[in-house]
Image (cartoon, grey):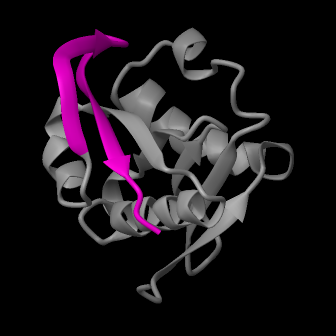
Amino acid sequence: MPSEFTISAATWRNHQRELRFVREQVFMLEQKVPKELEWDGLDTHAVHLLARDQAGNPIGTVRMLGDGHVGRMAVLAPWRGRGVGTALLKTIIATARSVGMAKIDLDAQVQALGFYECHGFIAEGPEFMDAGIPHRHMTLTLHG
C-alpha cells in the first residue's frame, strides 16, 4: 500500500466524526445527496474502513453491511486517482473473504462502472436513479 496514506478498520461508534466528514464532503456537498438519504441508519452495525493521509486526516471511506452490500465509498477530490479507492475496495473485498462471504454487491454510480469492473464486479440489471444519480447494481463472486 502506498505510504502516503493508510487504510484501517473503523467503527461508527469510535470514528463517526471522520467517516461523516468524508461522506458529507463527497456525497452531500459535491454530489448534492440529501442528508436524509445519506444517513440511512445502517452505519452502526456496518463494517467501515477509513483512509487517512500521513497526518492522520480522513481522506476516504467505504462500508459493508452484514449482507455483503458494499456502499458509501467516497474519496476526497484531491486524493482521487492516487490509489485510495483501489486500496479501500481491495481491503473491503479481503474483509468479506475473511468472514466467508460467497459474494458481495454494490450499487455503482454509472460513471464509476469501469473502476468496479477492473476489480471483477459484474453489472446486472438496468440503470436506475438513486439520489438523482444514475446507478447500476454490481456483484462480485468471491473465490476462497
Query: In the rendering, at what x and y percent does residue 106 appear?
Result: 39, 36
Q: Residue at x 21, y 28 (%)?
A: 124
Indicate whether 137 appears above or below 138.
above
Magenta span includes 89: no
The image quarter in which residue 84 lies: bottom left
Left or right of 36, for residue 136: left
Magenta-drawn stretch, dominant element (helix, strand or loop): strand
Please state, as top left, top right, bottom left or bottom right, where the N terminus lies in the image.
bottom left
Left or right of 27, for residue 136: left
Query: In the rendering, at what x and y percent does residue 7 appear?
Result: 57, 71
| Along the viewing direction, whichever of 73 and 139 lies nearer the viewer | 139
Q: Residue at x 26, y 60 (%)?
A: 119
The residue lying furthest to the bottom in this view is 3
Q: Which residues are magenta?
A: 122-144
Query: In the rendering, at what x and y percent does residue 87 appear?
Result: 42, 69
The image quarter in which residue 31 lies: top left
| Along the viewing direction, whichever of 54 and 86 lies nearer the viewer | 86
The image quarter in which residue 73 lies: top left
The residue lying furthest to the right in this view is 13
Q: Residue at x 33, y 52 (%)?
A: 77
Left or right of 61, for residue 30: left
Q: Residue at x 33, y 40 (%)?
A: 139
Indicate whether 93 appears above or below 108.
below
Number of residue marks:
0
Left or right of 122, for residue 38: right
Query: In the rendering, at what x and y percent does residue 32 appear?
Result: 38, 19
Magenta span includes 138: yes
